[in-house]
Structures are given as C-alpha cells and as structure tokens.
Image (cartoon, helix red, strand yellow):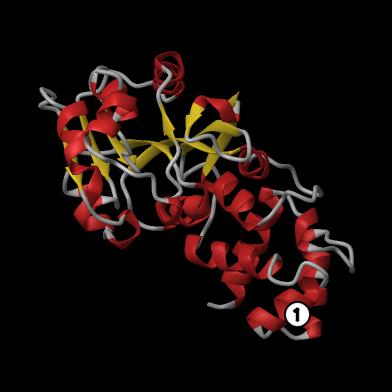
Amino acid sequence: MEISSILKDCNFEFKKKFGQNFITDSNLLNAIVEDAEIKPTDEVLEIGVGSGTLTKALADRAKKVVGYEIDKSLFDVLSLTLKGYENISINFKDFLKATPEEVNSQFDGSFKVVANLPYYITTNIIFALIEKDFNVSSLTLMVQKEVAERLCSKPGTKDYGTITAEIDSIGTARIDRIVNRNMFMPMPNVDSAVITIKLDKNKYDIKNLDLHRKVIRAAFSMRRKTLANCLKSNFALSQQKIDELFETLGFYKNIRGEALSTQDFVNLSNYINELKK
C-alpha cells in the first residue's frame, strides 16, 4: 500500500510544530542508505521516524534499527508500514530528552545515525550527538541545504561558526547530495541536502575536549569582537597572558575567531589548558 494511502486511512494529519516532511521516493531512500554505507553488521539510530519509509530502507540492510519519534499519533501508521520487521524498535519520545546511557543500552556497541531531521531542531540534535557520550561512529543526515553548507564551511567564510569547528575537531563532514524540495511530502519551502559526518575523536591531539569546545564557543560568542576580547571575557586572561599566547601561537593582534583553523583552535585550547593547571 502507498504511504499516502496509509496516512489517509489512519487519519494522520501533518503537524507543523514537529517540522514533518516525509520522504516517499524509493530511489532517494536507497541513496541515503548508500550514503550512510550501511552494512549487514551495522546498528542504526534513526531520529524522527516519521512514516517509516527510511526506517524500512535501513532495516533492509542493517542488523538493527532503533528509532525515536516524538509524534505518538504515528503509532498506527508505523504499525502498518513496519509490519513484519523484527529488527526495528521504536521509542515514542523526544530524542533530546533521552540520556546517552538510555540510547547506548539499546545497541551492542557503536552505531550509525541516519535521519531526516526536522529543520527546527537540526543543530540541537547534532550538538547533542557530538558533545554527549553517545557511541556514534557516523551521522548521515537530511538537513536544510544552507545548514549543510554551514557544516562544511571553511575558516574565514560567513558560514563558518561554532558547530563547524566543533565537528571538524572530531570528524570529517561532506555533502553527499542536494535534494530538491519537491521530493518531500508535504513540500518544504527550501531545498535540502544529505550530509555525512564521520567521527574520529583522535583526529587531533586535543588535551581537554570540554575546554576545547568552550574555547570554540568563546571565540564565536561575539563575532564583532576580536579573539583577544572574547578570551578576556570568557577566561579572565590578562592582557599580558593574551600577548604571550598570541606571540607563541603566531596570531596577529586583531584576529577574530572565524579566521582560526581547527588546528589553530587545538593549539589555542591546549595552550589555555596548560595555563589552567
């Protein structure tokens, strides 16, 4: 049965507050699974199960799929679309309220995240997945096109920001494909993109990851301010310490946070970490 018929038979109504835009095209669904490089031994976390079309495509390839869906009114829809799949389990709750311990306990080890994310919570979910202790090895996400561009942006560009630097510190992001807005039901107002982030917490020699993230956030906390002023405000460093830091790391006096590369941020956070000892 077509998904549109199932939604109609179940009297399902799209809810704008949940940012629901479902994918129905089988070629696109299979392409997302390919982008995520899903193998028979993989376990997958899907956030925002929706009508279950991506869930099915994942379950056809993966060992296990664990889904989180905030909209309990989709229960009847998913009972039909996922009928017969024994390697799928769905949690009807807000993923952002789930603890890493709760999520991790549903998997045998590390897992991949594959999701068609609601636009309004995209960055919140990405920050949660990369900052908290989830056993995630990679993220393959359908996001708004401009968000995908921001996640892959380079230092010195207008799109470069906190989330870009945080992701690049522990992984590598790539845009897999651009997806036209007419591929969704209902159709959103913007185009989307599939992005994959492969995580590697040993990518850089970061001495204190929590401090490293605080340094990145501080650097972008006041974009019109210089890096020196941002560091003074957030770490109570004297002008003398700032001068010594800049000379040691080779930063020019009026440099701003958006000009720093990931390696610059690593050098900066490691230096501040030594000062705090």
Q: Is residue 175 above or below residue 201?
A: above
Q: Please indicate whether residue 22 sits to the left or right of residue 169 in the image.
A: left
SS class of the residue under badge 1? Answer: helix
- Which residue is rendered at x = 34% and y = 21% of the image? 38
Q: Residues within 10 Å of mark 1 (few under 14, many from 20)?
A: some
Q: Residue at x 49, y 30 (%)?
A: 184
| Residue located beneath label 1 in the image | 241
Question: In the visual, does 204 lie left or right of 45?
Answer: right
Residue 50, position as x, y percentages in the image: 33, 39
Q: Quadrant of the N terminus?
A: top left
Residue 181 shows in the view = yes
Where residue 136 sits in the image (x, y, percent)?
35, 42
Q: Quadrant of residue 182?
A: top right
Residue furthest to the right in view is 253
Q: Viewed as shown, does residue 247 lie left or right of 11?
A: right
- Residue at 29% across / 52% down in the picture? 70
Q: Amino acid at mark 1?
A: Lys
Between 240 and 137, the one lying in front of the other is 137
The residue nearer to you, when weighing 258 against 247, is 258
Note whether residue 108 is visible: no
Q: Position of residue 116 (x, y in %)?
A: 43, 37
- Residue at image position (42%, 44%) is 20
Q: Position of residue 101 (x, y in %)?
A: 22, 57
Residue at the top extreme? 27
